[in-house]
Amino acid sequence: MDKTLFIFIFNNSILRKEIFKKVRYINRDILKYNSYKWNVIKNKPSYLAAYDYFDLLKERYKKMTSKMTWYERIVGSADLDSFISSVLLVLIKYGHLHTVKYFIKKQKSFNDFMVHYLVKAVCHGRFEIVKYLVSLTKPTFTHTFMLGYAPLGLNFDLLVWLVENKLARLIANGSINKYIYISMRNATVVGRLDMLQYLVNNTKTRLDTKDHLFLENAVSSGNVKMVKWLLEQGFSFRESEYYIDTAAAKSHLDLVKYLHQHKYGRSRGHLLDIAARSDNLELLQWIHENRTNEITTCDAIDKAAANADLHVVQWLYENRSEGCSTLAIDKASSVSLTVVKWLFENQSAKCTPRAMENALAARHADIMEWLFINIPEKCNRQLFTTGTLSKLIEENIENNETLIFLLEHRHQLITTEVNLKQLLEYSKFYNNSIAIIKSFK
């Protein structure tokens, strides 16, 4: 893009605002990504750790150490330990090994937290971090607990390393069968038939075909091959269980078809309502065509709206007659302006004041503004207190659109008269918020 044109466009405040509105719409309503303003990220160590802003984390650490007393420098600081451990757990989750090594070296009491660090690393399949942490453990440290969690990280190589390397002797003498069995169960939780078969073939632990959790977990995971394999091993479905409801709730169309075909278990009779929460239009269409005895309520559109699934909402509107309740717009107000607008234009049920409250809780100023203008009988009224303003001030977000909107409409939306002088005094430690409040003086 031409640099001159780029600068011209972004120097225009109206165009810039519209561009970022469109970007926010694409991220939130279409891609369904969470997005954060830089001013929010830079003030939250957990976000800095997730995105591996190493220099900023190091700067935060040095700032904390500079404020330590002489006593804390000798015996350690609880606040610093808490900061490092919380940062490390996030770094481990996202696999930032280089930064993990830096902060481990800075934590004097890291061995006290080692179990938590290893559990996090194993559960997220961070094999290299697991090996690094294990290399730091004392000879007396027990590693058996890791085997139970291993399948949850979906890392087959990590599981093999634990079975054939770290825990081989204990597995051979049969002393950790309990952990192997837990590992087998967890393999069904994540739908990893390869892991389950590996554990069965390479350990002395047998499957208990009376343990109904194996099949229930497999159904929840949606792995049809695993369900079939478990049935071949001697497991059986229970007539009283709602397996097909579970499969529909998890959006597993192939498994729903399989369970329907073989008449395994039973349904509560509201399968379409359940499937409406899954954002799977193909599943909805199949149930509509093949399970004609299902009872459907307005809960279907309400749930689809709550998930911002416009295509599902539209299909239900066109193919079903149940309609929706006020919950549809109320719930959609926390996730999608596009869905809110469509419901308003196409459904007779509107909303309650809860819609405005949900939009504020999700910090969607654009949805609040739209509700305020288009549904004034419900949303142009005194719904919030000065306490709401205080919380927004404390967030200290630059150009906080939600705070700006509430201040612009404080006479209509705040239950008591807003004293700007008092707000200025309250916000004196929040530089971004005080700048906003000053603009209303």
Image: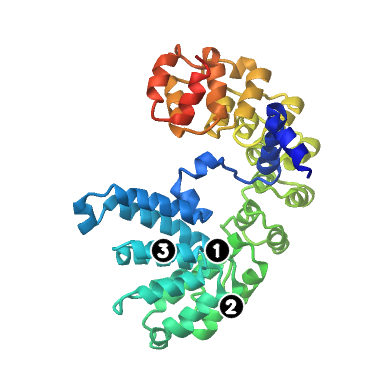
Q: Residue at x 36, y 48 (%)?
A: 63
The residue closer to the viewer here, 32 or 397, is: 397
Q: Quadrant of the N terminus?
A: top right
Pointer 3 local density, CA inside 10 Å: few below 14, some 14–19, many at least 20: few
Q: Which one is earlier in the sequence, the residue at label 1 or at label 2?
A: 1
Identify the amino acid type marked 3.
Tyr
Residue projecting furthest to the front: 4
Q: SS for tag 2? A: loop
Q: Which residue is mark 2?
A: 233
Category of crowding for the residue at label 1, using alpha-carbon neighbours closer than 10 angstroms: few (below 14), some (14–19), many (at least 20): many
Q: Does the rendering let one see residue 122?
A: yes
Q: Is residue 64 left or right of residue 125?
A: left
Amino acid type at mark 2 = Gln
Report the residue marked by disc 1.
Answer: 217
The picture places residue 191, in percent across and down from the top left corner, at: 59, 67
SS label for mark 3: helix
Percent coordinates x, y for residue 8 in the rendering: 74, 33
Residue 115 image point, x, y percent: 36, 66
